[in-house]
Image: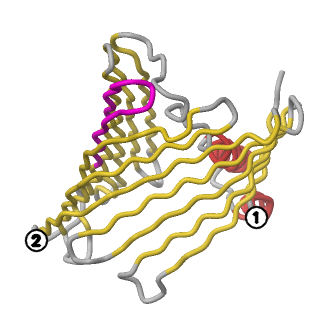
Amino acid sequence: MTKTLALAGASWIALFAAAATAQTTITGIEDVDDRITDIEETATDEIERSDDPLRYGNPNEQPGFSGSASLSYSGKTGNNESQELSVSTRLRYATGPWVQTLGVALDFAEDDVERTKEDALIVYDANYYFDDRFYAFVLGRAEIDGLADEADEIETDAFIGVGPGYRVINEQDMTWRVQAGVGVSYLRDGLGDSDTEEGVIASSRFFYRFSPEVFMTNDTDVLHSGDNVLRVNNDLGVSFQMSDVLSTRVSYVTDYNEARDIRTDNRLSLAIVYGF
């Protein structure tokens, strides 16, 4: 049997806080176990996020349809009544130079008084490969909050962008691809007022392997919207495969937005996964 121990930032503090305060069952074991699972998933996602399958040229996708789906449901009766339902699916379709991916996640929740969550997330990603270096992309995203009913609440947040991409470097130990294009964002608040604006998007994905156990990534995304607001996100990270059972990643994320009073946010994170 393999067990995984994951550390992410101040995860130990959160873990012991959960053990001391979360007691929704008689022993509280279920709450602690759920919290450990959350910490494991957070650390694992942080490490796996650096593995970009598009870095190395046209990926060898399974021809035709493939994908996965999941469903989670829980319900309570008695002193407190509630229901929670989560549904997600990821579908891929590959044919010739076309590779398309569609992801959908739905979350619903209600208690004995009212509906408390009605969210939908949709992501579409399509790439057409002209050769090993040059490709075209289409990116689409929509986030919908079915319960938004106030002016300061976002009911729909959507974006779609298209453009070309090119792999400047495509070697075994170093890859660099860039892509740029035009896009349109759409915002609709809880009262039905909407705003649509055009923008220019650009992205850079750089990978360098120092050794079989250590590699670095630097991912940059830039969006300049129609209201002359510049937004930049840069994620610099180094991943270490210390042994067959120990992996770690250190990353530094900078997020810049001209529309904010404090324009720059920075985040330093450490993720460690140890299996034994």
Check the image and report above or below for 157 versus 35: below
Distance, label 1 to label 2, CA atoms, is 40 Å
Q: Amino acid at mark 2?
A: Asp
In terms of depth relative to the viewer, which is nearer, 33 or 250? 250
Q: In the drawing, what numbered circle is on residue 261?
A: none
Q: Is residue 17 magenta?
A: no
Q: What secondary structure is the stretch in magenta mostly built from?
A: strand
Check the image and report above or below for 215 versus 198: above
Check the image and report above or below for 220 versus 151: above
The image quadrant of residue 98 is top left
Q: Secondary structure at mark 2?
A: loop
In terms of depth relative to the viewer, which is nearer, 258 or 30? 258
Name the residue: 22% across, 62% down: 155
Q: For the magenta stretch, what is the residue range?
A: 126-141
In terms of depth relative to the viewer, which is nearer, 191 or 132? 132
Residue ID for mark 1: 10
Q: Position of residue 146 (x, y in %)?
A: 23, 55
Residue most extreme to the front: 168
Check the image and report above or below for 259 versus 45: below
Quadrant including the N terminus: top right
Q: In the drawing, what numbered circle is on residue 193?
A: 2
Quadrant including the C terminus: top right
Q: Is residue 137 magenta?
A: yes
The image quadrant of residue 49 is top right
Q: Secondary structure at mark 1?
A: loop
Q: Position of residue 263 (x, y in %)?
A: 47, 82
The crowd level at tag 1 (other Cα within 10 Å; few <14, some 14-19, many 20+) is few
Q: Amino acid at mark 1?
A: Ala
